Amino acid sequence: MAVIERAKVAAAHEGNAELVVSIRYSNGGCSDVVLDSIAAAHLMDSCEATSLEQLAGHSWEKVQQALSISYNRFN
């Protein structure tokens, strides 16, 4: 199962903040996923996290759901 390993804030276009989430896969691989502010807020809420450190260990599926919510706001 893939889980969040860590997260950090990064600068994005025009000075907006993004959340970069590192996902660790069961085979040991790791990749980064970039979330906009809408997705980041949803991820923090769904993980009941008040700090980035509290995201560690949560399922990749919460990241997927956050990305979906952010994307679907345009539809």
Image: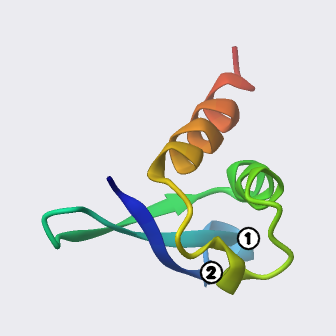
Q: Amino acid at mark 2?
A: Ala
Query: Label 1 amino acid?
Result: Asn
Instruction: Classify mark 1: helix, strand or loop.
Output: loop
Task: Give the residue at mark 1.
Answer: 16
Q: Are marks 2 and 1 in contact (CB under 8 Å)?
A: yes
Crowding at mark 2 (Cα within 10 Å: few <14, some 14-19, many 20+): few
Image quadrant containing the C terminus: top right
Element class at badge 2: strand
In the image, residue 32 sits, relative to residue 45, either above or below, namely: below
User: Is 3 positioned to the left or the right of 41 in the image?
Assistant: left
* Position above or below: 65 against 50: above
Residue sitting at x 50%, y 62%? 34
Nearer to us in this view, 16 or 47: 47
Name which residue lies at 25% across and 62% down: 25
Q: Is residue 1 left or right of residue 73?
A: left
Q: Which mark is residue 11?
A: 2
Please state the horizontal and vertical placement of residue 22, each as a whole percent of the image.
Answer: 42, 73
Give the mark nearest the N terminus, 2 or 1.
Answer: 2
Q: Position of residue 46 (x, y in %)?
A: 76, 50
Tell me the quarter of the picture where residue 67 sits. Answer: top right
Kindly identify the residue that appears in the image at 56 percent across and 76 percent down: 56
Query: Looking at this view, is 11 or 64 the one in front?
Result: 64
The residue at the far left in this view is 27
Q: Residues within 10 Å of mark 1 (few under 14, many from 20)?
A: few
Q: Is residue 46 above or below residue 27?
A: above
